[in-house]
Image (spheres, helix red, strand yellow):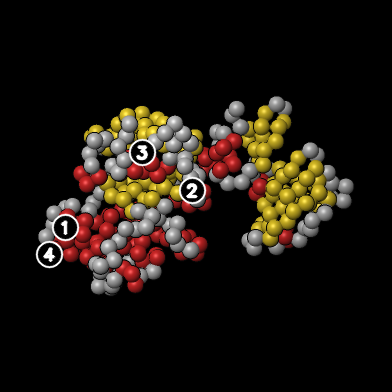
Amino acid sequence: MFLKLDHLKKLYDADNGVKELNFSIDKGEFVTLLGPSGCGKTTTLNLIGGFLKADSGRILLDGEDITALPPEERPISTVFQSYALFPHMNVLENVCYGLRFLRRMSKKEAIPVAMEYLSIVGLSGYEKSRVGNLSGGQQQRVALARSMATGPKILLLDEPLSNLDAGLRVKMRAELKELQQKLGITMIFVTHDQEEALCLSDRIVVMDHGDVAQIGTPREIYFHPESRYVATFVGKSNDFREGGRTVVVRPEDILLRMAPDGPYTIVEKTFMGSHTEYVVEGDGKRLEASLFGRQNSELETGARVAVEIGHSFFLNE
C-alpha cells in the first residue's frame, strides 16, 4: 500500500463532491479514475494533489499523513488539462522552473536535470523553442518533463489527452504508458474516455455520483462489471431478463447469420470502417451487434437473421 485514501470526504452540497472514498494504490501502478462529468473524479485528484481541503478522512502516502500539507509540500506533481505552461519562457526554462523554485536548485544544477527529462520525452533540440510554437503533443511532453523532473512520488494527470485530436491521442497514450513503465512512477490518470482507461491502466476506479462503483483491472471491469452502471458506462452492452436475472452481452460477442426464417430482423446498420454496427429486433429483444471484417459488412436492413450469443454474464443485483 503506497497511497491510501481513508474515509476521504469532500462535499460541495448534498449532491456534489465525493462521499467517502476508501481505496489504496500500489507503488508503480497506473490507476485511472474513470467516470462521467460530475462523478467526483477530478475532486478526488485535487484532494490527492492538495488543491482541495477534505471535509474529513485522511490521505496517507508512503506511510506519511499528508492530508494537511499544501500542494507545494507534497511529493506529488500534476499535469493539468491545459498543461499550465509559461508562455513567456522557452521549453528549457519551463522544465527548470520546478527544479529551481521547488527543489531549490541553482540554474547550473537545474539545466542538466531538465535536459535529461527533455531527452526522455523526446524533445532534445527544442530547449530554446517557445511553447506557443509547439504542437499540442509537444506541449504535453513539456508538461510531463516539467512534472517528472522534480522527482515526485506520484504523478497526477487531469485529462491530459482531451485537447488533442483523435490520431494524436492514440499516439500520446502509447507514449505515456511506455514512459510510465520505463520510469516506474506511480500515475493517477483522470478521464471520461473508456478506451483510454482500458488501454492505459493497471487498475481502474469507476466512479458514480461521488462513490466508487467498482475497482478492478481493465479485464475485470469490462468482462465482469458488478452493476448495470459499470456495464453500460464502460463499453456498450445489451441486457435482458432471463430466468429472473439480468443477462449482459457485449455487442462484439453477438454473431448474426443470414436466415430467411430467422427470429430477428436488422433494423439499423452503421458502417464504421473496421467493423459494422447492427441493431436487430425480435424474440422480444432489441440487440446491438458489432461485426468485424468486410464479409460481415454486407448484411442489409430488413434482412432476417439468426443470433448466436458467445460470452455473456449475469449482473449481481
At 30% from the left edge and 61% from the top edge, which residue is drawn?
Answer: 85
Assess disc 4: are there few (<14), some (14-19) or many (≥20) residues with their C-alpha within 10 Å of its C-alpha. Answer: few
Assess disc 2: are there few (<14), some (14-19) or many (≥20) residues with their C-alpha within 10 Å of its C-alpha. Answer: many
Q: Amino acid at mark 3?
A: Ile
Which mark is first along the chain, 3 or 2?
A: 3
For disc 3, the marked residue is 25
Count of picture labels = 4
Q: CA distance from mark 1 to mark 4?
A: 10 Å
Disc number at residue 108? 4
Which mark is first along the chain, 3 or 4?
A: 3
For disc 1, the marked residue is 100
Residue projecting furthest to the right: 261
The quarter of the picture where the N terminus appears is top left
Which mark is first along the chain, 1 or 3?
A: 3
At 42% from the left edge and 45% from the top edge, which residue is drawn?
Answer: 32
Left or right of 15 on screen, residue 239: right
Element under label 2?
loop
Marks 3 and 1 close (CB-CB < 8 Å): no
Q: Amino acid at mark 1?
A: Arg
For disc 2, the marked residue is 192
